[in-house]
Amino acid sequence: MQNEAKKNLLTINNLKVYFNTLEGVVRALEGVSLRMKHGKTMGLVGESGCGKSVTAHTIMKLLPPKLCKIMDGEILFQRRESGEVIDLTKIDRQSQLYRSIRGHEIAMIFQEPMTSLSPLYTVGNQIMEAILLHRQVTPKEARELAIEVLRAVAQPEK
Ligand SMILES: Nc1ncnc2c1ncn2[C@@H]1O[C@H](COP(=O)(O)OP(=O)(O)OP(=O)(O)O)[C@@H](O)[C@H]1O
Ligand SMILES: [Mg+2]
């Protein structure tokens, strides 16, 4: 699987994720497989409740570990600089390794801006925060980079 995964940015094989609830086990993902190519945009479409958000949260390692378990499968992610392929299901979400990936090589924009973005800070500030966390740059340089990405998606920088 690793050799094939070297051709993709992300390779998910037979991913199974279950939730423990008071009413019993919810089999949220029952064998999800997908491939994401480098430099391509991919859309995941499906009816409400089919597992799109759980798939994204599993990749981001944001699901509550007490309630939710990865039962099977692998999430093979190719690192940007080294080209090394790692299985995200096998690494700890609090590890230094994953911290260097999340917010830098993999990020998520949440569905609800009112709850996922802080109204106390501008979007530019929140982008700067991620840049300062991961790159050796000054606040001024981070600000310029943030403005650059806002321009790239045609958002006003003020
Ligand atoms: N915390 C949870 N506890 C129990 N079951 C959950 C939990 N979160 C999600 N599920 C279940 O997992 C399944 C997949 O849900 P998910 O939120 O991924 O759907 P979705 O495709 O993102 O839907 P939508 O289009 O409505 O956003 C659903 O059956 C849902 O009820
Ligand atoms: Mg969803």
Image: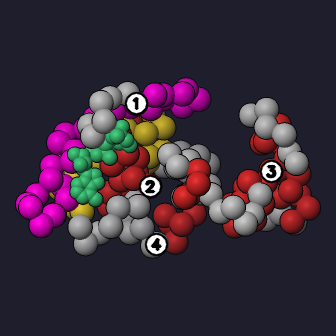
Residue on which the image places disc 2? 60
Q: Looking at the picture, tell me which residue is in the foreground, 86 or 89.
A: 89
- What is the CA distance from the residue labelled 2 to the residue labelled 4? 13 Å
Disc number for residue 44: 1
Residue on which the image places disc 4? 95
Q: Is residue 105 above or below residue 43?
A: below
Tell which circle, 4 or 1, labels the residue nearer the N-terminal end: 1
- What is the CA distance from the residue labelled 4 to the residue labelled 1? 28 Å
- What is the CA distance from the residue labelled 3 to the residue labelled 2? 22 Å
Disc number for residue 146: 3
Picture coordinates of residue 24 (x, y %)? 8, 60
With 42 as the anchor, is 147 left or right in this view?
right
The residue located at (79%, 32%) in the rendering is 154
State yes or no: discs 3 and 4 in contact (Cβ < 8 Å).
no
The kind of residue on which mark 1 rests is Leu
Secondary element at image label 2: helix
